[in-house]
Image (cartoon, coloured by chain):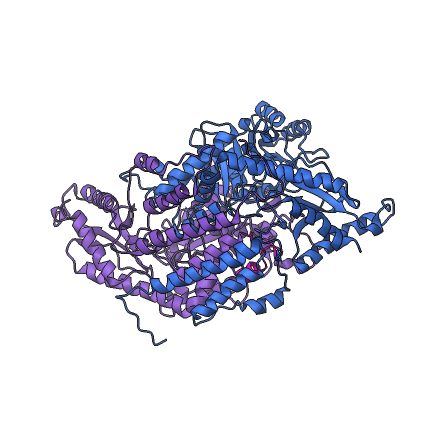
Chain colours: A blue, B purple
Amino acid sequence: SCHVLDLNEPIIDHAEGQLFLNEAFKILMEEVLCKGTDAKQKVCRYEEPEVLAKILDLELREAGEPHEKLLQRVRDVATYSVKTCHPRFFNQQFSGVDYHSLAGRFLSESLNTNLFTYEVAPVFVLMENEVLRALRFLVGWTEGDGLFCPGGSTSNMFAMNLARYQLYPDVKTKGLWSLPQLVLFTSPESHYSVKKGAAFLGIGTDNVILVDVDDGGHMIPEDLEEKIKSAIAQGAVPFLVSCTSGTTVQGAFDPLDRIADVCEKHNLWMHVDAAWGGSVLFSKQHRHLMKGVERANSVAWNPHKMLTAGLQCSVLLLQDTTNLLKKCHSAHASYLFQQDKFYDVDLDIGDKSLQCSRKVDCLKLWLMWKAVGSSGLAERVNKAFSNVRYLTEKMKKTEGFKILNEPEFVNLCFWYIPPSLRGKELNEDYQDRLAKVAPVIKERMMRQGSMMVGYQPLGNKVNFFRVTVFSPLVSTKDLDFFLDEIERLGRDL
Amino acid sequence: SCHVLDLNEPIIDHAEGQLFLNEAFKILMEEVLCKGTDAKQKVCRYEEPEVLAKILDLELREAGEPHEKLLQRVRDVATYSVKTCHPRFFNQQFSGVDYHSLAGRFLSESLNTNLFTYEVAPVFVLMENEVLRALRFLVGWTEGDGLFCPGGSTSNMFAMNLARYQLYPDVKTKGLWSLPQLVLFTSPESHYSVKKGAAFLGIGTDNVILVDVDDGGHMIPEDLEEKIKSAIAQGAVPFLVSCTSGTTVQGAFDPLDRIADVCEKHNLWMHVDAAWGGSVLFSKQHRHLMKGVERANSVAWNPHKMLTAGLQCSVLLLQDTTNLLKKCHSAHASYLFQQDKFYDVDLDIGDKSLQCSRKVDCLKLWLMWKAVGSSGLAERVNKAFSNVRYLTEKMKKTEGFKILNEPEFVNLCFWYIPPSLRGKELNEDYQDRLAKVAPVIKERMMRQGSMMVGYQPLGNKVNFFRVTVFSPLVSTKDLDFFLDEIERLGRDL
């Protein structure tokens, strides 16, 4: 390059850069937010990986590219990405869009700061504190602690670390070799991050003891107690019960009050993974599902799921008032958490986390909450329940659909049984053939781009669909479409 | 609320929402990107926490707020936040702004997907793969593996977990109780996440053995070898050396080639924490600082630092080609990673991570890289070195400034010695008085909003400033200002 380095000028041209940002903003407005939320447009435009790679021309090269080509790249990324904001994206728990949250996310990205000190994030240190306070209040705590984390898995792992540290503070310096063998308890329908956490924290997945569930997927407190006793008899030390409020597949809520009785009796840390279900706490009508949550030690809750706050927005809430989080996680970096600052250094909250760089995830939730109020968020939760009730009733009346259980939450699990399989339940190959239905329908909907919904097996139940209905963009006509589309795609199977 | 739930319509009004987003975009363009990058404007507007809380009116209430009030809130957040994009923000390693990266971030936020399956993130699965390939190529690897992580601390912890798992795969299921006592090695100037990781992974901070450094902050390979032998003699099992390329305070690069010799000899996993320094690999002129990096097992590198890719943009790169990352981290969640999908399920990369929700962090780096090319990124790195050289030479010629060491990287560590302390080096209270200078100057610059730069003590060295110069928005006049401003704020002390 013949370009001479000129120290006197910045490398970046603001006018050019801002022009690009403006143009890119228009494209994303058009392609993602207008077309992407339009039921008449495709939810995805599936291409085989080799084809897509060719279209996108991903290779990174020595030379830069001109303005127009870069805008085309923005357009391509938008075109070939899945539109999770689309009213027919039922695939996962991050569908829909909230414009206030999105404005908060754009602002967070522009401000590009790190939530570790009051010095560089004065607004967000105070704001995170207020959002955590408001969420804790919904749990039933007037005091406590907490932290925004990069996802629910991290929240669950932090809770595990806190439970261990509270019982054996020496673990922080001496490691697990100085401790007796620890065991923790969860249900087989809990999120996989409990096992991942046990492995990562050096506890080992064999020391995650699975407590039996009933048909609906709820942990059975009597079995929990029995398994605790049995573990103790074998010389292990139980330290944690990880309950779930809103399991991933069935949407089951573990009976928290009865589990709390067991935890109290055996002096165990009670963690509630409410990543998915926590948002019911906004609703007077539905918060009973989490009755007893105020007796927990910690709660993980992802407003990026049901509240449409945008990935990532995930909190760990604690009842603790003894600064356990900081004691457990701190490393006192002297270049960051200087004690001779001119303001109250308790505002430098970064040492509570195991992250150093930590994104600002509170602004989007705060702005959305300010926009619609607690009442508006409650309304969204209530509407989600009503929507799933509507879909369930309709499904029950429609031939060829079989639900697994009455939905407790906004997950509806069902089989679509094509005409060729109806009445053949007793045939030897019925289960094998039924297991192949959902994957084929899924492939067809993705290739046509008409809809997206997930499927999975569970225990001895072969592949079934799980639809989660909660996006504030969904109306009954989308639910009518949902049923018709499954049938249209599957009736020849 | 008398609002009746209408199932037939979505709750969110697109026209209203998009209007708000448009207006918010204009505000952030004006307040953050125009004013915030203007040297004539303040870099921060410091308020005491109680005052700021009152201005922001953070409380979350039952009712929502009208359009105009919400726009005022956007404006308030922008006004009172620190402008990390400002040319006089020298406080941390995330200063400056890149408009292409920012456009990529806005697009990622709008698309709001999760980087775990090809199904929901086809573009980004392929794109992440290409970005990782290109970064690995700079390390010197034509094959390998890797992952974007939520910050360098997580990358370092994942590397620690992999090193442990490779040596003792049983740890995943049985936990640390089945293993001998492990120890790892790092320098006292390495990032604090190494200790945090050891605590979190159940290894314990006492098992982090600190290797001596020379005056410039480089790990001494001879001391490393001695400490490895001594640990073995005491019955411990060394498993990892965590080196640093670009230490946080001094910007030192550990001698990788000589450390690699020691690691090879003792069969230890060699991790390089290049979160800060990794970007020198773009520069033909400066990449020699990391000579030997290709011999490492893993490298952590944060393009959100020197490359201005925006928080968070952090990768863990691996030389491994045996799928170690997936073997170590996977949990095979059947609802997500179904094996009967219609496309190649190796594209479902989510099980490589310990996160479930994982943000798309590759697009912003990819788009910026496409915009300026590898040559443009190399130019930024080269310019940063030139800028810090300019500042260093000027500082050496200016009375009252004393640098700690010749900068090896773009960190410049120095004391400002006010006139009242000059020539008093032998006075008994000299160090105590010098230690108080930086905090006062820092307080003054923040209250006036003229500049931000960090300070800290290190070992037996009392508080000194550390300025990092790398933002593509910085010109020599900002560096001239930097010196003048320190002097202006401190000369009466």
- Residue at horizontal 16%, vertical 41%? B429
Q: Nearer the viewer, residue B114 or A100?
A: A100
Q: Position of residue B383 (x, y in %)?
A: 32, 65
Q: Is residue A250 left or right of residue A120?
A: right
Q: Position of residue A213 (x, y in %)?
A: 69, 34
- Residue at horizontal 47%, vertical 65%? A71
Q: Nearer the viewer, residue B404 or A9?
A: A9
Q: Nearer the viewer, residue A314 or A227?
A: A314
- Residue at horizontal 42%, vertical 60%? A21
- Within the image, what quadrant is residue B474 found in? bottom left
Q: Is residue A205 left or right of residue B478?
A: right
Q: Is residue B164 left or right of residue B70?
A: right
Span of residues in magenta: B113-128
Residue A140 visible? The answer is yes
- Residue at horizontal 43%, vertical 29%? A322
Residue farthest bottom in this picture: A2
Q: Quadrant of the N terminus of chain A?
A: bottom left
Q: Eyeballing the image, is A438 above or below B344?
A: above
- Within the image, what quadrant is residue B7 found in? top right
Q: Is residue A470 left or right of residue A107?
A: right
Q: Position of residue A141 (x, y in %)?
A: 48, 27
Q: Quadrant of the C terminus of chain A?
A: bottom right
Whether B125 is among the magenta residues is yes
Q: Position of residue A298 (x, y in %)?
A: 52, 33
Q: Nearer the viewer, residue A319 or A29?
A: A29
